[in-house]
Image (tube, rainbow, N blue to C red):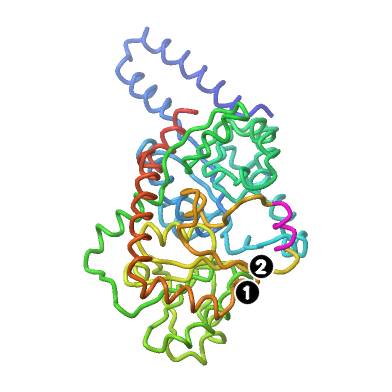
Amino acid sequence: MQKGRSEKVALFCFIFQFFSERKKNQHRASTFQFASYISIRMKYYLIAGEASGDLHGSNLIKELQKLDPNAQIRFWGGDKMKASGATLVKHYKELAFMGFAEVIKNLPEILKNFKFCKSDITAFQPDVVIFIDYPGFNLRMAKWAKENNYKTVFYISPQVWAWKENRVKNIKKYIDKMLVILPFEKDFYKKWNYEVEYVGHPLVKVIEDFKKHHPEIRVSGNTVALLPGSRKQEIEAKLPVMLQATKNFPEYQFVVGKAPSTEDEFYDSFIKDYKNVKVMSNDTYSLLMKSEAALVTSGTATLETALFGVPEIVCYKASNISYHIAKRLVKLKFISLVNLIMNKEVVKELIQTDLTADKITVNLKKILFDSEKKQQLKQDYAALKLLLSEGGNASENAAKNIYSLL
């Protein structure tokens, strides 16, 4: 069935009726009816597969609703997107498979998700499908969506500049509009002769707004944040090593930022033997504002921590199989977004076998007690924020780009 054909036929009939009624001196009533009809409710379908996508998706939805108050929105995402008033289809905690080995192990469930997503989009018949990061799933869905005549937008580019660069060929083929949030991505795509829109980074405004609305939160002189990730697999790999290092800082209170997709009980077995460690639920930003330093898993959290001005150590550890496959495929000097954007080592990265309690201890002492190191971090963080602010309000810019496409 040709998507939208029935609406076009109905609109044609209504226009015909409108002009017929004018001849019967019913112009005013018909004008009102016609205006009501042409404000057709646009349909948006968003797919986000992790906590960071839920955050950026929620702000995108709010901006879309400002432009299009009658918008109908269905999404895959989390609680933040749901709070914006859109309709939740599937929560990202059901999609949390990390690494090559984990994906293979859960392949039947992943295939089932693809099938369900296709059927739900078909039933909803959206005017546009918006993919938010989460490339393993979203690039495959984008191919299907484009082949079935849906408009496609990708918000927050896959990291094709890091590995599997040839994916750009499919992006050009299946994505109508690519909206990027990292300054260097526009130049990267240009060499592929693909025009993309740099909309700025959404975290800049998110964090500035949070600071503005919470002036009462102050840095506590003895708090260190532990952010081991949002998926159980990565928490199990990193949190025990982080906790071992806390024994060398008895005068400090270590606080684990609990991921929204995990249960409170999950953390109990890890922290029960550590008297100076506690868990804070669903309030990572408040935790970062209170913290003197942080141990952070690689990903969006490294950038959030930097934008809050908190000295950090980046911690990364995966299964041996996933790590060695990734090491062969990924050709980058750094793994953290902070270092990648600045193109130098701003924050220390402890990766795989380097992630030990001893090395965490050495580097944590530097960012806690070395005044020269702390001053350098402060300067680098300011330069980072300036660079990311150049594009403006990312969520607003992204919404305008999407709305203009329809």
User: Which residue is nearer to you in this view: 152 or 26?
Assistant: 152
| Residue density around tag 2, few if under 14, some if 14–19, many if 20 or more, within 10 Å | many
Instruction: Label 2: state its secondary structure.
Output: loop
Q: Are marks 1 and 2 in contact (CB under 8 Å)?
A: yes
Name the residue located 61 percent from the left edge and 76 percent from the top edge: 236
Give, as a single range, the part of the protein colored magenta.
323-329
- Looking at the picture, how far across and down is residue 232, in whole percent? 60, 71
- Looking at the picture, how far across and down is residue 74, in whole percent? 52, 47
User: Which residue is nearer to you in this view: 178 or 227?
Assistant: 227
Q: Which residue position holds label 2?
A: 318
- Looking at the picture, how far across and down is residue 328, in whole percent? 74, 54
User: Which residue is nearer to you in this view: 365 or 200?
Assistant: 365
259 is within the stretch colored magenta: no
324 is within the stretch colored magenta: yes
Q: Which residue position holds label 1?
A: 237
Q: Residue furthest top?
A: 23
Q: Amino acid at mark 2?
A: Ala
**Whole-number angstrom distance, CA of label 1 to CA of label 2:** 7 Å
Quadrant placement of the N terminus: top right
